[in-house]
């Protein structure tokens, strides 16, 4: 599944300063609303991917994987599907580049490949 959240970032960058200047919201509410919206989208996308692959359990990793609110939302979704959430501890949730490289190394070691896709 190919996902991009750049539209949300563009919208916030274009409107946040104005909304804050006009006292339409306070920074804490704006940040909380953005977090809840993006996390809800991530949970829904993850649930769709799990259904597509017929999986019940999920492993949350990466920098965002250390966020306790995201873990809570993912855990609820997994529980509703009869599954479990696994989250790595903070030592492994800091550098996405290293995680991607290590995942590639593990896949390479067991001869897992993906087809090259050219657009």
Image (cartoon, grey):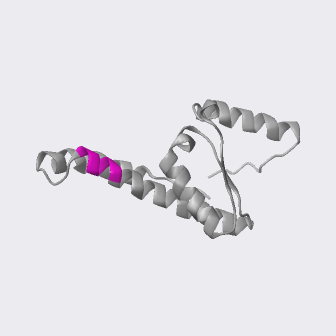
Label the magenta part by its dominant secondary structure: helix
Going by the image, does 85 lie left or right of 74? Answer: right
What number of labels is visible? 0
Please tell me which residue is depicted at 61% across the width and 69% down the height of the picture: 80
Please tell me which residue is depicted at 20% across the width and 48% down the height of the picture: 26
Q: Position of residue 37 (x, y in %)?
A: 40, 58
Q: Nearer the viewer, residue 116 or 5?
A: 5
Q: Position of residue 3 (x, y in %)?
A: 54, 55
Please tell me which residue is depicted at 70% across the width and 33% down the height of the picture: 101
Q: Position of residue 107 (x, y in %)?
A: 81, 41
Q: Position of residue 9 (x, y in %)?
A: 37, 48
Please tell me which residue is depicted at 41% across the width and 56% down the height of the picture: 36
Q: Is residue 108 above or below residue 4?
A: above
Going by the image, does 51 lie left or right of 38? Answer: right
Name which quarter of the figure residue 46 lies in. Answer: bottom right
| Magenta stretch, residue numbers | 27-32
Q: Nearer the viewer, residue 37 or 102?
A: 37
Going by the image, does 104 lie left or right of 64? Answer: right
Q: Nearer the viewer, residue 91 or 34?
A: 91
User: Is 28 inside the magenta-drawn segment?
Assistant: yes
Q: Nearer the viewer, residue 93 or 89?
A: 89
Q: Residue furthest left?
A: 22
Going by the image, does 98 lie left or right of 68? Answer: right
């Amino acid at each position: 599944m190919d996902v991009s959240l750049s539209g949300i970032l563009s919208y916030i960058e274009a409107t946040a300063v104005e909304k804050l200047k006009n006292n339409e919201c306070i920074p804490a509410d704006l940040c909380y609303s953005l977090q809840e919206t993006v996390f809800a989208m991530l949970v829904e996308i993850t649930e769709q991917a799990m259904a597509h692959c017929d999986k019940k359990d999920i492993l949350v990793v990466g920098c965002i994987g250390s966020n306790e609110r995201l873990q809570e939302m993912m855990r609820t979704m997994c529980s509703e599907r009869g599954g479990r959430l696994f989250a790595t501890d903070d030592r492994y949730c800091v550098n996405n580049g290293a995680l991607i490289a290590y995942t590639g190394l593990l896949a390479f070691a067991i001869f897992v490949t993906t087809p090259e896709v050219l657009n």
